[in-house]
Image: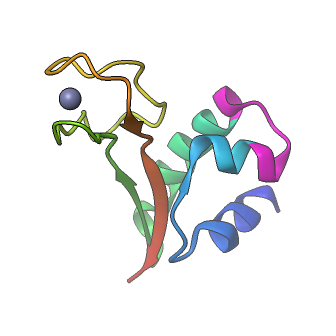
């Protein structure tokens, strides 16, 4: 049920972990766990979960793609103006 809800919410509609956490009224940590499970379980289904990596809005540095939580600081310019990672599901 919950899994279906996640797919419905994220289908072609990118959201940050924080936005999802508010929408589902679940702690961000739990949502991240659920998304990791979902990502694995979608392997044999016509959906693909994509994580758009966090990016520094100051210098353009792109963070690691598999992290869903927002980094605090840019390792390159030390800036804190960070675009949070977004999660989206595509139907293939
Ligand atoms: Zn930077």
What main secondary structure does the magenta stretch of the protein show?
A: helix
| Scheme by which the image is coloured | rainbow
In the image, 11 versus 63, the foreground residue is 63
Q: State the residue at coordinates (24%, 34%).
A: 63
Quarter of the image where ligand 1 sits: top left
Specify the quadrant of the image occupied by residue 91.
Answer: bottom left
Q: State the residue at coordinates (33%, 38%).
A: 66
Q: State the residue at coordinates (59%, 67%).
A: 10
Residue 25 vs residue 46: left or right?
right
Q: What is the residue that sits farthest to the bottom in this orientation?
A: 92
Does the magenta-highlighted stretch encompass residue 20?
A: no
Residues drawn in magenta: 22-30
Q: Residue 74, image x and y in percent?
A: 26, 22
Does the magenta-highlighted stretch encompass residue 25?
A: yes
Q: Residue 35, image x and y in percent?
A: 57, 46
In the image, 53 versus 11, the foreground residue is 53
Residue 33 vs residue 83: left or right?
right
Quadrant where the N terminus lies? Answer: bottom right
Q: Residue 53, image x and y in percent?
A: 31, 45
Q: Is residue 36 above or below residue 7?
A: above
Q: Is residue 81 above or below residue 24?
A: above
Q: Residue 68, image x and y in percent?
A: 46, 37
All told, the count of numbered labels is 0
Residue 72 vs residue 33: left or right?
left
Q: State the residue at coordinates (34%, 41%).
A: 54
Specify the quadrant of the image occupied by residue 3.
Answer: bottom right
In the image, 23 versus 40, the foreground residue is 23
């Amino acid at each position: 049920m919950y899994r279906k809800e996640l797919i419905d919410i994220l289908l072609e509609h990118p959201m940050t972990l924080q936005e999802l956490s508010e929408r589902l009224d679940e702690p961000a940590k739990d949502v991240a766990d659920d998304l990791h499970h979902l990502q694995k379980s979608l392997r044999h289904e016509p959906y693909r979960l994509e994580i758009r990596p966090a990016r520094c809005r100051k210098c353009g540095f792109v963070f690691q793609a598999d992290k869903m939580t927002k980094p605090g600081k840019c390792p390159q310019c030390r800036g804190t103006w960070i675009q949070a990672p977004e999660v989206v599901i595509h139907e293939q």
